[in-house]
Image (cartoon, grey):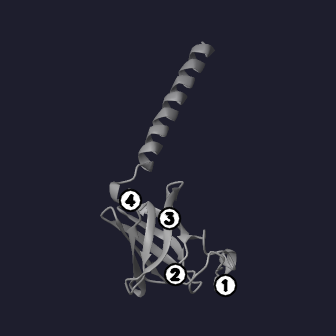
Amino acid sequence: MKTIRHKCLSAFALALLALLSVAAARAQQLSPKLQNAIGHWQIVNSDGTPGGQAETYLVDGKLFGRVTQARPGRTPRDVCDKCSGEYKNQLILGMVFLRNFHADGDDWVDGTVVDPENGKQYKGKIWAVGKDNLHMHGYIGISLLGRTESWVRIP
């Protein structure tokens, strides 16, 4: 009797585990618009000139980004001397400057952005416009008091 009960409980536990795995896999699926935010990007300055370059990628379902090319006028050896905390005097090239953005509808929200030029950390929102354009809005406090950058996909 115990053997049959044990087999039934084992089968039930296995079925429950399989069901949870399928649910977790579905939760990890991203909409095409969210997927379009992943890639290599040319950052465009507010005056329309090219800035640095960045790569966006996923870690545990969250969007991160790192500097892959310093902006014009910077060298690969430049550090973030105006930054504080863990970013203080960190090389700008390779710096993970976008962190912990999570999906909300078709946008990536509630992450943080560090601007190596002034060392400030902002809250942010990122969204794709088509397949080849990305917008990143950084702000302190309320979203209305921020600025939006445009990025263009690097093929």
Q: How many angstroms separate mark 4 from mark 1 (CA)?
A: 33 Å
Mark 2 Cα shell of 10 Å, populated few (<14), some (14-19), many (≥20) = few
Q: Is residue 49 above or below residue 105?
A: below
Q: How many angstroms separate mark 1 from mark 2 (CA)?
A: 17 Å
Q: How many angstroms separate mark 4 from mark 2 (CA)?
A: 29 Å
The quadrant where residue 89 appears: bottom right
Q: Which residue is mark 2?
A: 72
Mark 3 secondary-structure assignment: strand
In primary-sequence order, the first of circles 3 and 4 is: 4
Where residue 115 sits: x, y (%)?
54, 80
Kind of residue at badge 1? Asp
What numbered label is drawn on residue 81?
1
Q: Quadrant of the C terminus?
A: bottom left
Mark 1 secondary-structure assignment: loop
Q: Which residue is mark 4?
A: 34
Q: How many angstroms separate mark 3 from mark 4 (CA)?
A: 15 Å
Where residue 22 sits: x, y (%)?
44, 38
Residue mark closest to the camera, 3 vs 4:
3
Q: Residue at x 35, y 61 (%)?
A: 105
Kind of residue at badge 3? Glu
